[in-house]
Image (cartoon, rainbow, N blue to C red):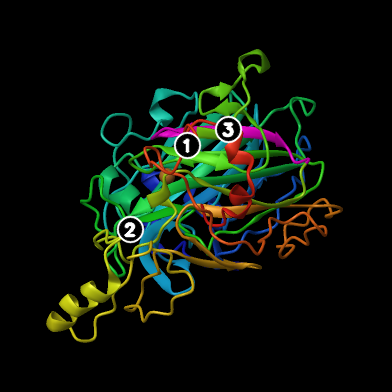
């Protein structure tokens, strides 16, 4: 699953004097590279305190090595190619072969030494968002350290004072480097294993991109008008599902490095926000939610008891964030006569296709797309088109999944008689307010129980 790339060449050796005097260049751990875009199995600790490791949607955890009492990691900032979903690729910047970078995982009290090698065409730094650490390790280019020039390696050393969920990202040409996908998550487990343990622990970071159909590079000067809304630089239907065993205690940790907030919604359950990038939320301060807003530059971790089996949609509740790039420039023509519209359009563009007069569900419509883009609404389930994109996936809660089994269990097998169903009934004669034939008051609920109401299919 890991491919290794021997990168420590002359450039790194020449820069030895730039490296902290405490370590030698020759002693840099190998930077491990990931070439898969699917969720990799959790990385269980082989030394130190045991913990239940996280899994990263469409991502992986960065392997480390022990060197004395230091846990050593190696991040490689570099250009990468990332598939958003089958049919669309982007040329991004990231770490160790992917955008976002690998999740860094450690334990409260650990001393971490993180090597950062810059293989980008411009300078970078790494800021450890939310970490309580010495100022000189905070990674703000110019303010707390010199920028890491191309080809150079810097070392960050600090002790993990607190457990929780954190992020890392550049603090150097930030607008460009974050718009290009440079970011990752950093999870610190409590040293006390009895502190709020969970059975499954998912993590991902949200990013957004502005990419015209047919192009491969995000527009890095865009400030607000993005068209690809991604979880771990993937969009639906490219986002991994969250497979969960019925009865599991589940934690989902979500970072937001987009330029807007995301109200994240889970169906079929009630959850509580258990942590932010500032630390753990005391139980006395938690309240039940089904949607939690994740502000810009923040993290929300929520805990949920997965006690309701099924396929549960899990998504951002801004409807334009569950869509992909194609088609946002369309005008609203709901209610316009398709025939008249087709006649008018046909004069100008004989091959044009008139659409949208009854809504915009396009899931089942086969339309040729330009190269390298994705339909606005796409994906399919066992009952047909799902008509989603962007920040959407499914929590799949099933009986009897094995502890570390994160494979997609496939579509839910609904017990007989538990799925919403259609009946054969004529459309209702809807009484109108002010209609002289209508003797009933509009609010007369007795009338609303009449046979007419039973057949309100499609209302
Ligand atoms: Cu959103």
Magenta region includes residue 297: yes
Residue named by callout 1: 439
Horizontally, residue 415 falls left or right of residue 37, namely: right
Instruction: Say which of marks 3 and 1 sits in front.
Output: 1
Few, some or many residues within 10 Å of mark 2 (<14, 14–19, 20+): some
Distance from label 2 to label 1 (Cα)? 76 Å
Q: Are marks 2 and 1 in contact (CB under 8 Å)?
A: no
Few, some or many residues within 10 Å of mark 3 (<14, 14–19, 20+): few
Q: Which residues are magenta?
A: 293-307
Based on the displayed image, in which of its 4 quarters is residue 82 positioned?
bottom left
Horizontally, residue 69 falls left or right of residue 255, namely: right
Which mark, residue 120?
A: 2
Distance from label 3 to label 1 (Cα)? 13 Å
Horizontally, residue 114 falls left or right of residue 80, namely: right
Horizontally, residue 296 falls left or right of residue 193, namely: left
Residue 228, given in percent of the width and then of the height, sits at 37, 57
Which mark, residue 445?
A: 3
């Amino acid at each position: 699953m890991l491919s290794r790339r021997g990168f420590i060449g002359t450039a790194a050796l020449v820069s030895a004097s730039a490296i902290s005097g405490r370590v030698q260049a020759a002693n840099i751990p190998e930077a491990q590279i990931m070439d898969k875009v699917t969720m990799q199995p959790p990385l269980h600790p082989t030394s130190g305190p045991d913990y239940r490791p996280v899994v990263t949607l469409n991502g992986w955890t960065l392997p480390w090595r022990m060197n004395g009492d230091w846990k050593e990691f190696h991040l490689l900032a570099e250009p990468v190619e990332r598939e958003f979903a089958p049919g669309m690729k982007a040329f991004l910047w990231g770490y160790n072969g992917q955008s976002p970078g690998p999740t860094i995982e450690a334990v409260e009290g650990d001393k971490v030494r993180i090597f950062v090698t810059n293989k980008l065409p411009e300078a970078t730094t790494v800021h450890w968002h939310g970490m309580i650490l010495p100022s000189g390790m905070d990674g703000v280019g110019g303010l707390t350290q010199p920028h890491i020039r191309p080809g150079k390696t810097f070392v960050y050393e600090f002790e993990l004072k607190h457990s929780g969920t954190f992020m890392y990202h550049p603090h150097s040409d930030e607008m460009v480097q974050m718009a290009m996908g440079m970011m990752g998550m950093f999870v610190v487990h409590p040293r006390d294993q009895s502190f709020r343990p969970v059975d499954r622990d998912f993590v991902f970071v949200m990013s957004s991109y502005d990419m015209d159909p047919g192009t491969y590079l995000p527009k890095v000067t865009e400030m607000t008008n993005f068209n690809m809304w991604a979880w771990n630089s993937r969009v639906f239907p490219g986002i991994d599902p969250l497979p969960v065993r019925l009865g599991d205690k589940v934690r989902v940790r979500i970072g937001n490095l987009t330029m807007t907030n995301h109200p994240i919604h889970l169906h079929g359950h009630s959850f509580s926000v258990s942590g932010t990038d500032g630390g753990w939320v005391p139980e006395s301060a938690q309240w039940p939610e089904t949607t939690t807003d994740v502000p810009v530059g923040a993290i929300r971790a929520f805990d949920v008891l997965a006690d309701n089996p099924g396929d549960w949609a899990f998504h951002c509740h801004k409807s334009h964030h569950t869509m992909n790039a194609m088609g946002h420039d369309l005008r609203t023509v709901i209610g316009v006569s398709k025939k008249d519209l087709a006649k008018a359009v046909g004069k100008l563009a004989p091959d044009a296709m008139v659409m949208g007069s009854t809504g915009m569900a396009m899931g089942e419509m086969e339309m040729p797309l330009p190269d390298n883009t994705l339909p606005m609404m796409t994906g399919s389930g066992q009952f047909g088109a799902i008509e989603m994109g962007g920040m959407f996936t499914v929590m799949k809660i099933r009986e009897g999944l094995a502890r570390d089994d994160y494979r997609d269990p496939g579509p839910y097998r609904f017990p007989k008689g538990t799925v919403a169903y259609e009946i054969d009934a004529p459309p209702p004669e809807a009484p109108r307010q002010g209609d002289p034939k209508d003797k009933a008051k509009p609010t007369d609920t007795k009338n609303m129980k009449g046979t007419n109401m039973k057949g309100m299919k499609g209302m």
